[in-house]
Image (cartoon, helix red, strand yellow):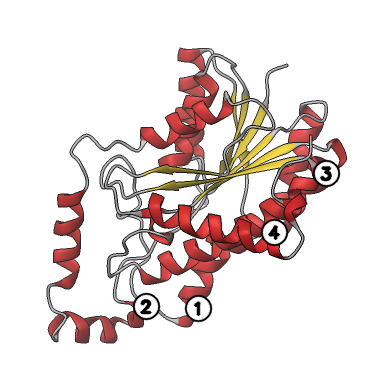
Amino acid sequence: MPQTYLITGAGTGFGALAARALASSPAKPTVFAGMYSHDSNTAPFEADLATFNTQNSTDIRPIPLDLLSQSSCNAAVSTILSTTSGRLDAVVHNAGHMNYGFAESFTAEQYLRLYDVNVVGAHRLNQAVLPHFRTQRQGHLIWIGSSSVYGGKSPMLGAYFAAKAAMDSLAQTYARELNPWGIESTIVSPGVFTKGTNHFADAMKPGLEGVAREYEDGPTKGVGEQTMEGTAGVVPEDADPVMVAEALVRLSEVPRGEKPYRINVDPGQDGSEEGARVVDRNGDEFYRRLGLEGLLKVKM
């Protein structure tokens, strides 16, 4: 039977591209596209998906999903299970929100908001879907993280990078604790893409405007502009966010029990692959020292 996917934040960016790429793949899975908008208007996203379905004979189904609400997460999973005869095979934790500005210029509440969206939101959805995965003793969690966790970090994105690092750490723990249940995990670490998404345009702006102006007029004057210019210079011209969607399609074709633990999609080559390799190796070795090596492989 065709598999069923749930992708969060599938209205735009990586999520929208992934929904289309997976639904168009030879296996033709059913893809539930989690819909959320800051202005509560997801109609344009849903209309685009309807057109895509008609033109490509795909099965992408928009579904309301607010990761800041446990009841919304529960309702989305319940709807999926009731309309697919209990079929849900993979969840893609893609939804996220970025910031752009000097670290001090964001309020504590803004930091908490970014953490809530990028980290706690994935946890809420896990609490809705994992009882089903554990009952069926299989499933696949796919976490869309960031190469910044173990690679180069620019200024101006500190709060976002911190949230992504927390997400990566949480994904690692979840992976080990779920392996005995037959549930696989993959952390996908995209690099920077300056075109093809709305990440920078939709980024959270500093809440402390006075602090932001002090940085912009002081010895850090020009850092924001240089960061954008420098980032554009290190990202290849042909870097297209569809690369992330294509990586998810290839991942879907890997047999159960052989899913990779981590995938890097980093055209800018910021060193994340090498850094993650060291961290993951050290983590595996520590589990062995604890006598928990049985948590390192998914139970089939």
Marks 1 & 2, CB-CB < 8 Å contact: yes
Q: Nearer the observer, disc 2 or disc 4?
A: 4
Name which residue type carries label 1.
Glu
How far apart are the alpha carbons under marks 1 and 2?
A: 9 Å
User: Relative to the observer, which residue lies in front, 169 or 239?
Assistant: 169
Tell me: residue 267, above or below residue 5.
below
Q: Residue at x 12, y 73 (%)?
A: 222
State yes or no: discs 2 and 3 in contact (Cβ < 8 Å): no
Q: Say which element carries label 4.
A: helix
Task: Decide: is 224 above or below 7.
Answer: below
Q: For mark 2, what is the residue?
A: 207
| Residue drawn at (51%, 40%) of the image | 10
Mark number displayed over residue 109: 1
Q: Does dot 2 land on a helix, a strand or a loop?
A: loop
As drawn, which residue projects farthest toward the front? 289
Residue 134 - label: 3
Residue on which disc 4 sits: 288
Q: Which residue type does callout 3 highlight?
A: Arg
Query: How many residues crowd mark 3 within 10 Å: few (<14), some (14–19), many (20+)?
Result: some
Q: Is residue 180 left or right of residue 282?
A: right
Left or right: 95 in relation to 100: right
Q: Earlier in the sequence, mark 2 or mark 3?
A: 3
Q: Is residue 268 visible?
A: yes
Other-residue count near label 2 (Cα within 10 Å), few / some / many at <14 / 14–19 / ≥20: some
Going 58% across and 44% down the picture, which residue do you hit?
261
